[in-house]
Amino acid sequence: MRVFLTGGSGYIGKATIGALLRQGHTVEALARNDRAAGTVRDLGATPVPGGLGDLGVLNAAAARAEAVVHLAQAETGDEDLAAATAMQDGIGTGPYVHTGGTWVYGDTLGVADETAPWNPPSLVAWRKPVEEAVLRRARQGGRPVLVQPGLLYGGENRLIDLFYTSPGKDAGAIPCVGTGENHWPLVHIDDVADLYVAALKAAPGAVYVGVGGVNPAAKDCALALSRAAGIDGKVVSISLEQARERMGPIADAFALDQQFTPARARAELGWVPTHTDPLAVLGRR
């Protein structure tokens, strides 16, 4: 299958290109500059010069593809919806896989699934109208699918490294918001890449949380990160207000208490996460 992908040079994108190619697909990937083009080319994909604001480029690339996977992070909801619309117009009745995230559900009060009510922190509140519009295309003959990854780990570990490991090394202790009893719905980058590939065969309008099914406490994650950083398991508790000062609005997302099950993706797509010990991976030097 010919797949057009956005965000190919990013954390999820690089893993997803690899997963698509291993399954025999060919990939064209949006590349906003020469560096990004070199990255996707080295991975085995064909770069398509342009950015999310180049709607004509997105539409044309989607029109010559057989499926689209939208991974790039937009700056605003308007930008994301405009890009999604251009690509959905281009792909027509072919599969269009859109990226969301589990943070939109807020605190889950136990183990939840895709039917949980939405209660997003301000950081991701813009996602609801975008994703509703994307999924409405199923009523018009389109094949939209929504994948909502949990908190990613493995490989570059971008968010966790930026907000936890790097500042923790500098301070001599990994930060933990509050008591750390809240849970993180972790998913390994390689597993979520496989989910994007599996989602190409999903039914129109389907929604899948991309989680590993292991939801460790944030404090246990911080302890593992501390061991990996070589600072002897040192963790420091900080208030939510302090976290907001240090991290910005993403602090409210890290403070969420979320637990999810991947049961729907397992039942409908046959997707089974293979990385089931996130603390071992986080704690690895």
Image (cartoon, rainbow, N blue to C red):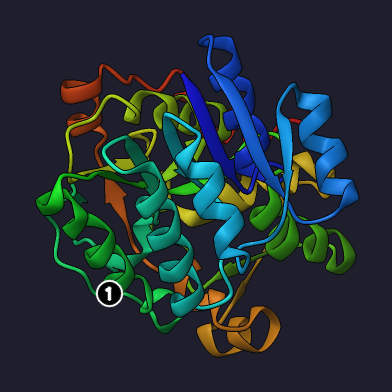
x and y percent of residue 34 in the render?
89, 49
Q: Is residue 169 left or right of residue 198?
A: right
Residue type marked 1 = Pro
Residue 276 sits in which quadrant? top left
The quarter in which the C terminus is drawn is top right
The image shows residue 74, relative to residue 122, as above or below, that is: above
The image shows residue 56, relative to residue 4, as above or below, that is: below
Report the front residue among 243 and 71.
Answer: 71
Residue 92 sits in which quadrant? top left
- Tell me which residue sits at (39%, 33%) in the image: 212
Asked if residue 56 shows in the view, the reply is yes
Asked if residue 149 shows in the view, the reply is no
x and y percent of residue 198 in the render?
36, 23
Q: Is residue 171 left or right of residue 64?
A: right
Report the front residue among 224 and 211.
Answer: 211
Q: Is residue 113 left or right of residue 20?
A: left
x and y percent of residue 90 in the render?
41, 48
Task: Look at the numbered disc 1 and give the secondary structure of its residue.
Answer: helix
Q: Which residue is mark 1?
A: 129
- Tell me which residue sits at (19%, 30%) in the image: 263
